[in-house]
Image (cartoon, coloured by chain):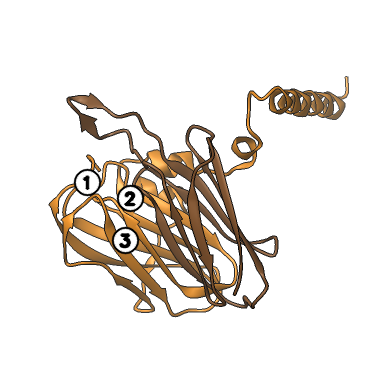
Amino acid sequence: MNPLRRNMLKGTAGVGALSVAVAAGLLKPGQVLADWNQAGFDAKKVPDSLAAIGASSAANSSNIDLKAPDIAENGASVPLEITVSMPDVDSIAILAEKNVYPLISDYRLTNFGGFLSTRIKMAQTADVRVIVKAGGKVWTTAKEVKVTIGGCGG
Amino acid sequence: MAIPMKMRASTDAIKVLITHPSENGLRKVNGQLVPALFIKNIKLAVNGKVVADGQWGGGMAKDPYLNIKVQGMKAGDKVTVNVVDSNGDTGNSEATVG
């Protein structure tokens, strides 16, 4: 018996079944093709979130500027502005360290122009952490945001 | 139902505002948990080339907003945004850099 051939046949059958599922409307193409870091977004402890995005060994960088309010009246919508002064940025991730699920977003970037702003939820007073991967290295910075009223259970 | 959104593109930045509940599954209304429903993927492309491939969790604020500066855009470039949420619903929008 030829194991390679068996694998090839199995592989073909798998692709066939997937195509059928898509054609039948059981799966939407976006769901099949989209990439989503289940382990990272389901993690409840910051070290696990960081491990899942390959950022366990991030070093502090003064080339990442994180602007966020010192005090957020409403944790349901906390504005962040991230300015990155380094070349070859490959990705940026954002975490709120005391949220039930700390990882909020992770972007792979091409031709990044050095600035990203968004709005996140925060359950309680915590550090907001930004992870930047650039030139094969992993950098980070964090800023504490005091939250008066937590947003949506975090 | 298509996820509604607005996008603006200039020569240096793409701004997207999406109308979406962004529920993380932890919020309670009258003692009942509201089921999770949030956007999982957002893709921004300029002339078909992906410039930002984002993964989101339920920690994005309601009606998610994203503003990203992108290098090398010029007037006439076609910018597209595509999103998929945790229910598999999708939305998209396109704009021309003015």
Question: Which quadrant of the structure image shows residue B98?
Answer: bottom right
Kind of residue at badge 3: Arg
Instruction: Give the quarter of the figure containing the N terminus of chain A.
Output: top right
In the depicted structure, whether residue A123 falls above or below residue A80 = above
In the depicted structure, whether residue A106 falls above or below residue B72 = above
Circle 2: element type: loop
Which chain did the image draw in brown? B
**Farthest residue toward the top?**
A1
Q: Which residue is mark 3?
A: A129
Marks 3 and 2, how far apart at CA: 16 Å
To the question of a shared chain for discs 1 and 2, the answer is: no
> Chain A in the picture: what colour?
orange
In the figure, is residue B55 to the left or right of B43? left
Image marks 1 and 2: residues in contact by CB distance under 8 Å:
yes
To the question of a shared chain for discs 3 and 2, the answer is: no
Q: Earlier in the sequence, mark 1 or mark 3?
A: 3
Image marks 1 and 3: residues in contact by CB distance under 8 Å:
no
Of tags 1 and 3, the one toward the viewer is: 1
Q: Residue at 47% of width from left, 35% of height from top?
A: B86
**Whole-percent x, y for residue A17 in the image:** 74, 23
**Whole-percent x, y for residue A105 in the image:** 42, 53
The dot on residue A48 is none
Q: Which residue is mark 1?
A: A151
In the figure, is residue A123 to the left or right of B14? left
**Res A90 visible:** no
**Farthest residue toward the left?**
A148
Q: Which residue is mark 2?
A: B61
Mark 1 crowd level (few <14, some 14–19, many ≥20, 10 Å Cα): many
**Chain of the residue under label 3:** A
Q: Residue at 59% of width from left, 43% of height from top?
A: A34
In the figure, is residue B24 to the left or right of B9? left
